[in-house]
Image: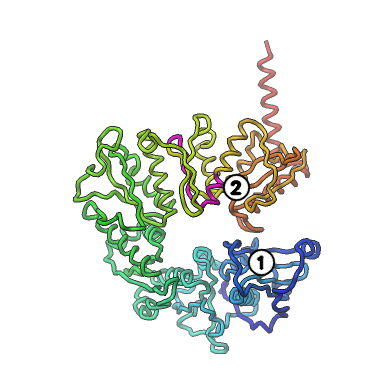
Amino acid sequence: LVCSRHFLNSSSFELIGNMGDRSRSRSQRKDSRSRSRSRTPDGDKKKPSDFGVDSMKITDDDAAFILGKGGKTKDKIARVSNAEIELFERDLILEFRGSKLERKKAKKYCEGVMAQRTGPVNVTQDYDDGDLTMIMVPQEAVGFVTGRSGNFLRTIEEEWTTLMFFCEVEKGRGRGKDFEKLAIFGGVRARRGAELKVLSAVETKVQGYFDKIRDDVVPRDKGLGEDGSWGTDTMTFQDDELSYALGKQGGTRKKLERASGAIVQYIGQVALFSGEKRYRKQAKEYMKWLFDQLEGPVYVHGWEDRDDITVVDVPSDCIGYVTGARRAALGNMEEEWGTLMFFMNKDGVKGDKGAGKSRGGGGSEQLAIFGAERARRGAELKIMSAVETKSPGTFTRGLREKISSEKGFATDRIIFKDDELSYALGKEGATRKKLELSSGAILQYVGHCAFIAGEGKERKRCKQFIDWLLAQRRGSVTVSDVADRDDCTEMHVPDNCKGWVTGNRGSELRRVEAETQTFMFMALDKTGEERLLIFSANPGSKAANGGRAHAERLVNDMIQEKLRGGSRGRSDSRRRNSRRRSRSRSRRRSP
């Protein structure tokens, strides 16, 4: 199998030990080593009390396996172990930063990856640090589960942040000819999500297999989780019910999973809901309401006392516009924000809630939005924006600016002037989306009012971005010092490359922004020197797409391209445009 790996003991490598007390400046390292670093997504988290640094000596061939294509394998190991991994390529040393358990896991995963050239994996119980799930896969389903060149397993690893491979259980026993053992490493939620997805695929190939192992699968990890209530509930469907609960390309299942916070997976005719008790309860309630809608209008009694719902009064004459043809618009919003949304009708009477609130006095209906707080707010603001477009003044009449002092999740409001709104919106909303993605806040325009939702730091960042954006209309922007910011990369572009990097009317910068989800512009520092600033809450990484590091790579590529004489495609295009303009001027001059 392409994905098979083999664990070696730590003694197979030269360990340099715990280096938590060692002090060495970053500048010294930079001079002496070529390095590649993978950070965990929450790199700014508070360091644990047992934080330290371990080091491992590796070979040149090992380094290639650890890095993987474009550094993806190293990044994956960092995410699964929650440790920070740094590879010093010149000295062939791996460094692991994190708690004692995080470092242990990271080293264990790296050993497995490096040893994959030697044969099948040998996993014993010693390798279980509370991060391992083992499942039996029938031999006839192994190829299906693996996918071509291991692509299906890699997709599951990416989706659930796990490390997965087929293995031997005990050294020397060999593989059973009827089954293969699949090892899944990761957190309890990640392992469960990956396990159920694999079993769903197996059931497609070997029908009835889940019934044989159900008693082992369902109670797995019971009592774990954040509050000790982790478990799995089940529900059995009929054939016609299953297709409805699954939805087109699994869209309904994914929607219920994201909105409820529970893992929702279908294995044959059985729906499994895994997670903490409150999330499992929500998932089952959402499923019930989904099927209740087939019988008629649904109303959630006591919704005022729930903490997973937001209700928006939508004017009756805007309902079709908000819903879209065959529910397409509402479905797109659900997919974008990970929410469950439907109109609530008490006793089947439409238009009886909030009557008189719409401009036409035609009444309104209650739109229920279920999901996490952030997701509900994003969907709510998008609904408000759509309604305001159709019925101006519904939500903005008498509205004023508001800046919240709340450091946690809250919403600020800014009122735009006419010319400011169109500039801050951009073509097809591209500028608004750019500001939203780069700042990490939710940014939505409802009429002339910009709603900015998120944590205090995100809202502050988004407001700054808007101020700098609008200031660009009046000329050069001065941003004195960015040294203390954790969301900015500063690049000094050679004078002869600035026009090439920015492109015609900033077109090249806009292209890089769209590709990397960043906010970029040329700005003056306190001495009047111009440099390129790349802003984003996402720092990015050396190999991954998206974030400031990705944008920096693309800009450096353009600088090198220009210094080498320019891209043939771009230079030819510019010369053709120049010749075209010249011929046009000549024709106009002819008598």
**Mark carried by residue 467:** none
Q: Is residue 553 left or right of residue 376?
A: right
The residue carrying pointer 1 sits among few (fewer than 14), some (14 to 19) or many (20 or more) residues within 10 Å by Cα, namely many
Kind of residue at badge 2: Thr
Q: In terms of sequence position, does the residue under pointer 2 or pointer 1 come before the other?
A: 1
User: Which quarter shows the C terminus?
Assistant: top right
Q: Is residue 116 visible?
A: no
Please tell me whether mark 2 or mark 1 is closer to you in this view. Answer: 2
- Which one is in front, 539 or 2? 539
Q: Of 572 and 79, which appears nearest the observer?
A: 79
Q: Is residue 452 magenta?
A: yes
Magenta stretch in the rendered image: 447-462
In this view, the residue in front, 280 or 353, is 353
At mark 2, the secondary structure is loop
Q: Which residue is mark 1?
A: 67
User: Which residue is depicted at the point 64% across and 66% down?
Assistant: 68
Colour setup of the view: rainbow
Q: Quadrant of the N terminus?
A: bottom right
Q: Which residue is mark 2?
A: 518
Return the x and y of residue 385 as percentages of the image width and height. Answer: 41, 40
Q: CA distance from mark 2 to mark 1?
A: 26 Å
In the figure, 222 relative to 324: above or below? below
Which residue sits at x=67%, y=45%?
Answer: 533
135 over 519 or under it: above or below: below
Q: Residue at x 62, y 45 (%)?
A: 512
Q: Amino acid at mark 1?
A: Leu
Residue 78 pos. (x, y %) = 60, 67
Seen from the viewer's position, the closer of residues 275 and 565 is 275
Count of numbered circles on the image = 2
Residue at the top extreme of this rendering = 591
Q: Where's residue 109, x and y in %?
A: 60, 74
Asked whether residue 219 appears in the rendered view, the answer is yes
